[in-house]
Image (tube, helix red, strand yellow):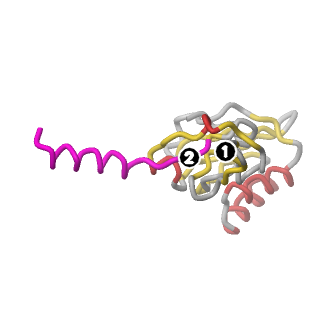
Amino acid sequence: MPRREEWERKARQQAAVQPALDCEACGALTSGSAFRYFSDRVICAACERQNPQSRVRNVPREALAPREIMVNFIQRNELRVQATAADGRTSLSPFIPIASGATLRRLLAYLGATPQQLGDFDHAFRVWGHGTTQIALLPGRRNLLRLRE
């Protein structure tokens, strides 16, 4: 392969990835512009905890962009939530118990739900006690839904 083509291939590969911190404490995937260094440790922007430098790795840019997910909530004996992909079929997390509807509402707001999506959640929770809310999951947030990559 000629040198120019080799150089262009490497440049494309490097442009497609960027450094990110995979936090040990909260599970947030934080972009390189959001975390900071203190001595030889890396400080997470989401939880302000220290991480070893080995937790910084190169990830595809798509992993740090907002992504559409659906949050299913069911109230039987207790309130439980589960995240699924936008297609509604692929499970992204296990069922997680939540203390109350108000706690779930704050969780959705933290993860990136719009006021209209929160209104839809309020209506479904009040009328039926279960439902699905589609949100754009913001990058750099704590992994409170225990999403699997």
Q: x, y (%) of residue 98?
A: 83, 41
Element type at mark 1: loop
Q: Residue at x 68, y 45 (%)?
A: 42
Q: Is residue 61 left or right of residue 118?
A: left
Which stretch is magenta? 1-21
Disc marking residue 28: 1
Q: Residue at x 54, y 56 (%)?
A: 66
| Chief secondary structure of the magenta portion | helix
Q: Are marks 1 and 2 in contact (CB under 8 Å)?
A: no
Q: Amino acid at mark 1?
A: Ala
Q: x, y (%) of residue 7?
A: 22, 47
Separation of residues labelled 1 and 2 (CA atoms): 10 Å
Q: Residues within 10 Å of mark 2 (few under 14, many from 20)?
A: many
Q: Amino acid at mark 2?
A: Ala
Disc marking residue 20: 2
Q: Reply above or below: 109 against 38.
A: below
Q: x, y (%) of residue 145?
A: 70, 41
Q: Reply above or below: 110 against 99.
A: below
Q: Is residue 14 left or right of residue 71?
A: left
Please check the rendered image and state whether residue 12 is part of the magenta-colored stretch, yes or no: yes
Q: Reply above or below: 66 against 73.
A: below
